[in-house]
Image (cartoon, grey):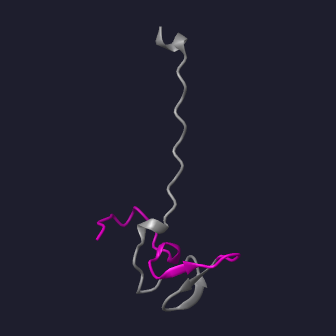
Amino acid sequence: MFKRKDNDYQKVCLFCENATILKGDDNILCKYKGVVSEDYVCRKYIYDPLKRQPSIKPKMPTISKEDLL
């Protein structure tokens, strides 16, 4: 569905379509493998772009009136 380069994201269970994040722990509940760490990857891995947190963009510098003159 989405065409991406291999460099654009890491293959980790945290971004898998078959995974559910467990609260209060760094583990993931996999639909196929059960409870695994968030760094785990299996053959059933399917990237889910909606699970990825976007990076925060840097603030734009403010321009004063003196800079425009």
In this rendering, the answer to whether 16 lies above or below 68 is below
> Percent from the top left, x then y, of residue 21?
58, 77
Residue drawn at 56 percent across, 76 percent down = 39
Residue drawn at 48 percent across, 92 percent down = 32
Query: Mostly what secondary structure, the magenta segment?
Result: loop
> Percent from the top left, x then y, of residue 46?
39, 78
Q: How many marks?
A: 0
Q: Quadrant of residue 62?
A: top right
On screen, residue 31 versus residue 47, left or right, reads right
Q: Quadrant of residue 4?
A: bottom left
Residue drawn at 50 percent across, 75 percent down = 12
**Magenta segment range?**
1-26
For the N terminus, the quadrant is: bottom left
Q: Farthest residue to the right: give it.
A: 24
Please say whether residue 13 is one of the residues in the magenta stretch. Answer: yes
Q: Farthest residue to the top: give it.
A: 69
Q: Quadrant of residue 9?
A: bottom left
On screen, residue 63 versus residue 8, left or right, reads right
Residue drawn at 54 percent across, 49 percent down = 56
Please say whether residue 4 is one of the residues in the magenta stretch. Answer: yes
> Percent from the top left, x then y, of residue 30?
52, 86
> Percent from the top left, x then y, of residue 36?
58, 85
